[in-house]
Amino acid sequence: QVQLVESGGGLVQPGGSLRLSCAASESRFSSATMGWYRQAPGNQREFVALITSDFRTTYADSVKGRFTISRDNAKNTVYLVMNSLNADDTAVYYCNLVHLGAPDYWGQGTQVTVSS
């Protein structure tokens, strides 16, 4: 059973930064595509960023230039550095792990609140 544990969320002022982490208990982590998604109250879960096994990255237009996704295969961990945060970034952030042709897995989420 794959487990994903997110951490690093919290309360930050507008313009501030946070780094989210997601640790995976998965023996084939290095071959997985890892993603971050978020869900704000009353909204559907939306894509934020992903990183493939060969380190290619994709970002939602709303976070491009502000967020950076990275991975450390030695630690089975994916990161999301979020800069220039604003109120629209307030949401629960979820980590996702997927292998081609297989079911994907989700973490429990970590709350990010941007407020003064």
Image: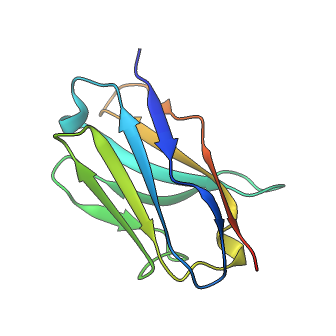
Q: Name the quadrant containing residue 104.
A: top left
Of 86 and 39, the residue lying toward us: 86
Quadrant holding the C terminus: bottom right
Of 30 and 77, the residue lying toward us: 77
**In the image, 81: left or right of 17?**
left
Of 77 and 40, the residue lying toward us: 77
**In the image, 87: left or right of 7?**
right
Residue reaching furthest to the top: 1
In the rendering, at what x and y percent does residue 33 appear? 31, 44
Q: Name the quadrant containing residue 65.
A: bottom left
**In the image, 10: left or right of 3?**
right
The tally of labels here is 0
In the rendering, at what x and y percent does residue 54 appear? 15, 52
| Protein image colouring | rainbow
In the rendered view, tell whether residue 53 sits above or below residue 83: above
**In the image, 29: left or right of 109?**
left
Residue reaching furthest to the right: 42
In the rendering, at what x and y percent does residue 12 appear? 64, 71
Residue drawn where x is 21% and y is 27% of the image:
28
Residue drawn where x is 64% and y is 70% of the image:
89
- Is residue 75 among the parts visible in the rendering? yes
Residue drawn where x is 48% and y is 78% of the image:
83
In the rendering, at what x and y percent does residue 77 appear? 31, 43
In the rendered view, tell whether residue 86 sits above or below residue 53: below
In the rendered view, tell whether residue 47 sits above or below residue 116: above
Quadrant holding the N terminus: top left
Q: Name the quadrant containing residue 32.
A: top left
- Is residue 104 among the parts visible in the rendering? no
